[in-house]
Image: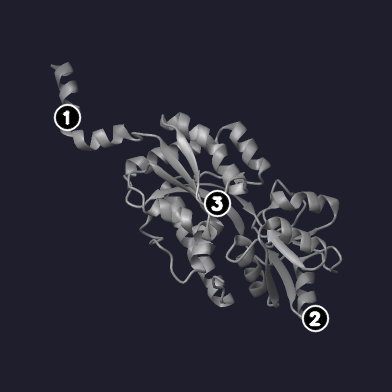
Amino acid sequence: MRRRHTLLLPLLGLPGLARAQSFPARPMRLIIPFAAGGSNDIIGRILIEGLATRLGQPVVVENRGGAGGILGNEVVASAAPDGHTLLLTGSGSFVSSGLIQPRVPYDWARGFSHIGYIGASPAVIAINPALPARTLAEFQALGKTRGQPMSYASPGVGTTGHVTGALIGQVLGIGLEHVPYRGTGPALQDVIAGRVDMISNAAAPLQPFLQAGTLRGIALAAGRRSDLLPNLATAAEQGFPAIDSATWFGLSTTGGSPAAAVTAVHAALNATLAEPDVRRRLLEQGLEPEPSPTPDDFARFVATERERWAAVIRTARITAE
């Protein structure tokens, strides 16, 4: 009798149980909203083996670059809401790029179900070493006494580096003229050459130049120091806690996807991030892994980030060019 009840009980909840057991029912896609070869692509590909092993299905990367990440976001927002299409969500591609556009082809709040945080690389604020400043306060004083606005370089309009520079200018109360480039490389070169005063970017691309002395780090835009640059004081330590910015990444999927699918991918993501080899490879990219306790925690983080940066972008009157 006991055996018979055991066999019959699952039938009582068959529809829901079948859905839970069938996920994932086929190979999954990870949409990376940038071209192959960049930091987004590298970080996404570090994760796919661990995700595939734990979910029991291949995870295939698709690079869908364009419009600062908006085209890739649209692919996920318009996919079937079954959790099989994942998005590498990022601070630039999901938050700032969308905020500077007059309209985007999806509803950012309803078009996505957020899964989990991957990690972040706090922004390093660096200047040309010929400038007579070694701290944020000294850079602020220089900006207030110089006859013309200071300048800052970014990898492009709407990038994390763009909006971070705007935030720095607002907090310090100085004029900062934005000089956009097509990528981090050319932006760095003009700061090193002295044609632009400042850049804020993740640590990894700046580190060789900081070590060589061709760039000078004056602050980490964070509340706590980074293991990557332990001797660089934070903006908070220097009296400017509002200067807080990082290049961060997470995983999302199509809005309306089953909660069971979101939970399964979240568990697979956190287990993958706990692998020592994965942590090492992410740290080599300048990303400090930081799993989110629940999908809801990551969703709240994304909403808070959008609200915070929307205020900065409105004040700076940043729009897509």
Q: Which mark is residue 145?
A: 2
| Labels 2 and 3 touching (C-beta < 8 A) | no
Q: Nearer the viewer, mark 3 or mark 1?
A: 3
Visible residue check, residue 99:
yes
Mark 3: which amino acid?
Phe
**Which of the labelled discs sits on residue 34, or is there none?**
3
Q: Position of residue 35 (x, y in %)?
A: 57, 49
- Along the line of sight, the residue nearer the viewer: 131 or 43: 43
Report the disc number at residue 11: 1
Identify the residue at image location x=70%, y=65%: 153
Query: Which kind of residue does numbered mark 2 sit on?
Result: Thr
Residue at the image point whose x is 52% and y is 69% from the top: 100
Q: Residue at x 63, y 51 (%)?
A: 121
Mark sitting earlier along the chain (2/3): 3
Foreground of the two, 69 or 149: 69
Amino acid, disc 1 = Leu
Q: Nearer the viewer, residue 162 or 227?
A: 162
Mark 1 Cα shell of 10 Å, populated few (<14), some (14-19), many (≥20): few
